[in-house]
Image: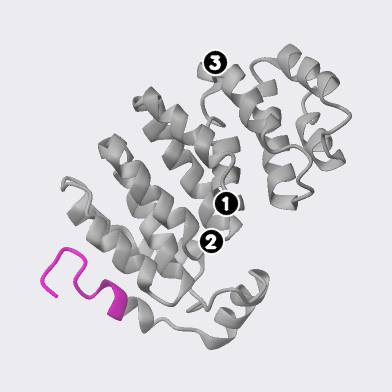
Amino acid sequence: MDSWYQDLFESLEKMHDKEQGAKMSAYMQNRFPFLGVPKPVLKQHIKPYFQKSRKMEIDWDFVHLCWKKPYREAQYIAIEYILLHEKQLLDTDIDKVRELITEKSWWETVDSLDSVAGTIVLNYPYLKEKMRKWSISENIWLRRVAIDFQQKYKEKTDSNLLEEIICNNLGTNEFFIDKAIGWSLRDYSKVNPEWVRIFLERHKGVLSNLSIKEASKYL
């Protein structure tokens, strides 16, 4: 393997801590195996490799390689790498992000990828239509990203789209959906509290208690 990430995985795997890995896996409900490398240590390990890649174009082959690795730390590496190259992302990359969201899905990777999707849509507004489609997908993780992709938008939030997407997901009784609704409203309340108050009043009969609780945090 002659590439900028040569030896990255081999050296990482030598750091395997079976006991710590079991604890980290248990925290994620044993959905994924872990090497047992804590996030701060992992970031230090990948830093010299990422310095080499910083000025290169984003390498999606590397991302996909990370996603194929059996241990969860590899997916965390992929996300850190994508965030490093976030400014390079193109509209066509939204489908690559979709693939990552729907494979090996769990809240910790999905919640990192929603901001990536948000960056792409902010730069290519026509992709809002794709977020509408994601909001009615059979995949709950695509729905979650559609609800939360505007979290960092602040004053740039498309409130009409936010309301439409949330309304597409009312009454699901799905924890990860109800939580996402609450978070999106909570963040928007920081810049437009009156809009959120009106929204909560208008939909109080169908919003879950969890969504209302999260949304009301700063009101």
What residue does disc 3 label?
155
Identify whether 113 is placed above or below 50.
Answer: above
Decide which of tag 2 and tag 3 comes sooner along the chain: 2
| For residue 131, above or below residue 40 | above
For the magenta stretch, what is the residue range? 1-10
Side (left or right) of 15 relative to 200: left
30, 177: nearer the viewer: 177
Does residue 79 sit above or below 83 in this rendering?
Answer: below
Question: Residue placed at 41% from the left, 26% from the top?
Answer: 122
Residue under the image location 82 percent in, 25 percent down: 203
Q: Secondary structure at mark 3?
A: helix
Q: Quadrant of the C terminus?
A: top right
Q: Earlier in the sequence, mark 1 or mark 2?
A: 2
Q: Return the x and y of residue 57 as percentages of the image width and height.
A: 17, 46
Q: Which residue is mark 2?
A: 105
Across and down, in percent, residue 37 comes to 48, 73
- In the rendered image, residue 33, in percent from the top left (x then y), is placed at 53, 79
Q: Does residue 56 appear to the left or right of 22 in the view shown?
A: left
Q: Amino acid at mark 1?
A: Trp
Return the residue at label 1: 141
The residue that appears at 14% across and 75% down in the rendered structure is: 1
Q: Position of residue 133 (x, y in %)?
A: 51, 37
Total tally of numbered discs in the picture: 3
